[in-house]
Image: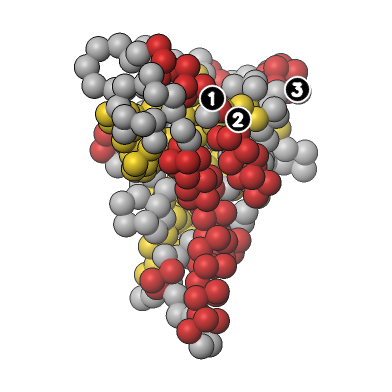
Amino acid sequence: MRGLGWFTGLGALLAAATAGAERLPVVPLDGPGLKRVCETVRPDGQVKFTGNEVERGKARAEYRKRRVAALERFYLVTVPSIGFSFREYDVSEKKLTLETRKVLPLADGVELAFAAGDDEPEIAAALGPQPAEQVVLLRGKGKLGLRLTFRLDPGQAGDPCTRSPTRKVVKAAVDPLAFELVELAKVEKTLYRGELPGYTEALQGSVPVKGPKVRLGKPSAGQGEPPAPLIAALRGLEPALLQCYRQGLENNARLRGAIVVGFKLDAGGRVTHASAEINSLGDDEVTACAVARVRAHRFARGVKPGRVSVPVYFQSQDD
């Protein structure tokens, strides 16, 4: 059987292909580190805060900020050979697929778990039969590592980690974004790197906003096309909404997203009610500011009164 010399060439090609390529900003973790993160992301209802009423309220608010930040981060772990396995090699597709139906032991008392059913991720390396066999042999010798980039997946319960006091095990549900197969040696070699469908979107959202921009989408005002006077009047809102966005970027330089603001307009051009109907921005202060600016806006009398919904996009000039 051939040796691993061909892997050196593959590694060089991979390094050249990915040199200068943008990568997600990740937090490297080992087993104890992931355990600590799991404590940070406990829902605040499971945490006891001490002090008087005001002190407890402040402590809860600060805890929630840390929790949200931990859930938004990207993490990187290296699973040892004993902690993962592959499914049977697919000859027709020429791919070696990671077994994701089982938990991945990361360290003593720490496990990784993937979504099941329709949401189960496919983590597969596109390799010919001979390279795939060499990868499998390396794993069998304990010389292959799985380097996984992921976000924590809180699921419907809101907590990505399950804790078993009897087994003294913490299991973290993860949303994988990228993976590498690494030869574990004095000088590690990346043998294969793959990115999952959510990686590009996550990468875009991780880049700080350069040149903030607010764009209003096509409004909805009953049946048919929105009238031109309404579209023109809405454009006048963009500078005020941009101020809200700039304030939000002071706290989160990567803030992007959209909201749909619904409002009711009377015959005099006054907004009598406004609210956020849909919100994917994830920033309550910017959302409240935007709704307040819409509520305070005075429309020209030529704009027909009634109910209006308008999407508002907060993004970078480069997006």
Asked whether residue 315 is in view, the answer is no
- The Cα–Cα distance between marks 3 and 1, rounded to whole angstroms, is 44 Å
- The Cα–Cα distance between marks 2 and 1, rounded to whole angstroms, is 7 Å
**Disc 3 residue type (three-letter):** Ala
Residue 235 pos. (x, y %): 51, 22
The label on residue 236 is: 1
Tell me which colouring the rendered structure shows.
secondary structure
Asked if residue 158 is positioned above or below residue 279 in the image, the reply reads: below
Instruction: Say which of 244 and 1 sits in front.
Output: 244
Q: Secondary structure at mark 2?
A: helix
CB-based contact (under 8 Å), mark 2 and mark 3: no
Q: Residues within 10 Å of mark 2 (few under 14, many from 20)?
A: few
Q: Which residue is mark 2?
A: 239
Q: Secondary structure at mark 1?
A: loop
Q: Quadrant of residue 120?
A: top left
Q: Which residue is mark 3?
A: 19
Q: Where the C terminus falls, by quadrant?
A: top right
Q: Residue at x 60, y 30 (%)?
A: 239
Q: Residues within 10 Å of mark 3 (few under 14, many from 20)?
A: few
